[in-house]
Amino acid sequence: MSDKKLDISKDEYGHLIGNIESISSSSYLDPNGQGYYLAELSIPLDSQPNFKGSFRFVHNMTGKADIIVKD
């Protein structure tokens, strides 16, 4: 299995908008001490006004998200 990192630049492609359906109650630490949370996301790809390009989800893929909370 290849351990390639997929980097989709938000400056070039825009960004995806979705919702967190569930998130782990505790973080996981990688060998460098960086903490991560496991989350299930809902991202409707057919209605993404701010994303240009194609996107393919892969089981157990990782990513970085910015969480924006509105009042």
Image (spheres, rainbow, N blue to C red):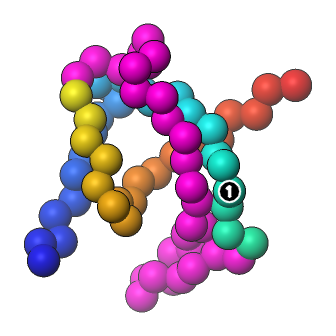
Task: Tell me: residue 51, above or below residue 44.
Answer: above
Task: Tell me: residue 47, above or below residue 55.
Answer: above
Q: Nearer the viewer, residue 53 or 8?
A: 53
Task: Tell me: residue 56, above or below residue 36.
Answer: above
Magenta segment: 26-53
Q: Residue furthest right?
A: 71
Q: Nearer the viewer, residue 55 or 29?
A: 55
- In the rendering, at what x and y percent does residue 46 appear? 40, 20
- In the rendering, at what x and y percent does residue 56 appear? 25, 42
- In the rendering, at what x and y percent does residue 30 appear? 46, 82
Give the residue displayed 22% in from the left and 28% down from the top: 54
Q: Residues within 10 Å of mark 1 (few under 14, many from 20)?
A: few
Task: Tell me: residue 51, above or below residue 49.
Answer: below
Query: Splitting the image into 4 quarters, where does residue 71 fall?
Result: top right
Give the residue displayed 54% in from the left and 82% down from the top: 29
67 vs 47, left or right, is right
Image quarter (top left, top right, bottom left or bottom right) of the N terminus? bottom left
Q: How many marks can you see?
A: 1
Query: Could you tell me if residue 12 is visible in this image?
Result: no
Query: Splitting the image into 4 quarters, where does residue 36 fall?
Result: bottom right
Q: Secondary structure at mark 1?
A: strand
Q: Nearer the viewer, residue 6 or 41?
A: 41
> For mark 1, what is the residue?
22
Give the residue displayed 67% in from the left and 61% down from the top: 23
Helix, strand or loop: magenta stretch: loop
Q: Nearer the viewer, residue 56 or 67?
A: 56
Is 44 contained in the magenta span?
yes
Give the residue displayed 68% in from the left and 56% down from the top: 22
Amino acid on which disc 1 is placed: Ser
